[in-house]
Structures are given as structure tokens and as C-alpha cells.
Amino acid sequence: MVIDIGNTTGKYFCFEGEELLAHGSEEGHALNFLAHIGQDAAAAIVSTVVDLAPEAEARLRALPCSVLRFTAATPTPLTNRYRTPATLGTDRLAAAVGAWAQQPHRPLLVIDAGSCITFDFVTADGAYVGGNIAPGLHARLQAIGDYFPRLPLVSAEGDTPELGYDTETAIRAGVIQGMKHEIEGYIAAFRKKYADLLVFLTGGDEFRLDDSVKSCIFADHFIVPRGLNHILCHHLSMTKASL
């Protein structure tokens, strides 16, 4: 069982081996779903970006299995070359592991278009090198509204022409088209260096990318929980080997 706790929601994912069987989420960090989900789990992994309340911690302790807390110190199948591993977001590392588990021995660019948009690179020999972080779609729209009083706060939903025909569509198209070209630019630059590059795209925001880059892209909304599950399996195999 994978438990992934973000800033506003708690999510669970049930795996059998590498196969995802079920998943769900709830608002907040109370982990009430543990009263109904996970009672048959053989092992669990928890990744959280917040400190849990005592009630949530008690629900984790009540699980009938061992619970691995995923931190910067947790061994993974990848070699971590990040210079400050303690500051590396566990979701970024988990996504890199999730991509590597599906396509090992290939250079991988993992793009997560969520609250922030992140670009992370894994070498063909299984080394996580690092990556870049940029504002996500909603952060960019919010920034325009915050920093430019004469410009409106624009929703991400609505018409997105190639060129805006009024202020609202100009802002929306400028942000979305800019992110699209940003993603395509990263992919093109890495493909020049690594001809056999594969790209994993995840996150809540979707972009209509050009056909020239689609051929090397895998879209996977569950790449982070897949990575966490793979890290848990890796931990269990190491534990078994040491006995």
C-alpha cells in the first residue's frame, strides 16, 4: 500500500506487485480511509510533505503491517547525485524511480506539470542527476494578477487561441502556449544530447504538444505512486536479502 500525503489531500494506492489495483483520496491529512483501506496490506510506504497529527499517526501505527517512511535517507534503486538530497522533494525522486522501473537503461526526462512544473533527468546507468523547478500553470496566472494591477486574474479554463484576441485570452494563451513551448524546448534540447531519450509526462495539467515530440513521451498520471511502490518493493527485497 502506498500513502501519499500532499499539502491538501491524502491519497492511497493499492498494488499487487507492480500492478495498481485501487486508489482514492480524501481532503485533509486525517487518513480516515485507513479504517477501511489497508487492513489486508502486507507492507506500506508513506510519503508526506506535512507533519501529521497524532490521530493520523495512530491510524498508521494501527495498520497490520510494517510501514516504511520515505525520506531522503531511504535507499532507492537509483544513485542519487543531487548535492543536497535532504532538500529534494520526495515526489520528484519517486517519479524518477517510477519512470526507471518502467523503462530501465534508457536516459529519462521526467516532467511533472502540477503546482510547479519540474524537469528531472535520469541517466541510462540509473543515476538521478537533478532537475529544474518552474512555476506551474495556476501559479503563473496568479502571478500576473498579483504583480500587474491593471491585468485581470484569468482562469485556466476557456478559449486558448494561438494569439489572444482580448486581454483574457492573451494572458491565458501566453501562459499555456509558453509552458507548451517550454516543455517542447526541454525535450528538444535533451534529445540532441541523448538520441534514445524517453520522456515521462505526469501531473494535473495537460498540454497539446507537437507531434514532433509526442513519439518519445509516456503519459502516466500514477508515476509517483508507482515509484513509491517500487521503492517499497526494493526495501523489502533488501531486507529479505539481509536476513
Image (tube, rainbow, N blue to C red):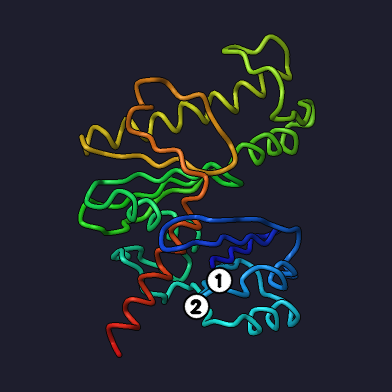
Q: Amino acid at mark 2?
A: Leu
In this image, 111 relative to 169: left or right? Answer: left
**Residue sitting at x 76%, y 58%:** 27
**Residue sitting at x 53%, y 41%:** 113
Vertical position of residue 220 compared to residue 79: above or below: above
Vertical position of residue 189 compared to residue 80: above or below: above
Give residue 129's quadrant in the image.
bottom left
Q: Amino acid at mark 1?
A: Val
In this image, 218 relative to 44: left or right? Answer: left
**Numbered mark located on residue 46 in the image:** 1
Vertical position of residue 48 compared to residue 54: above or below: above
The residues bearing labels 2 and 1 have C-alpha atoms spaced at a distance of 6 Å
Q: Which residue is mark 2?
A: 68
Tags 2 and 1 touching, CB below 8 Å: yes
In this image, 84 relative to 139: left or right? Answer: left
Q: Position of residue 29 (x, y in %)?
A: 72, 67
Q: Nearer the viewer, residue 154 or 122?
A: 122
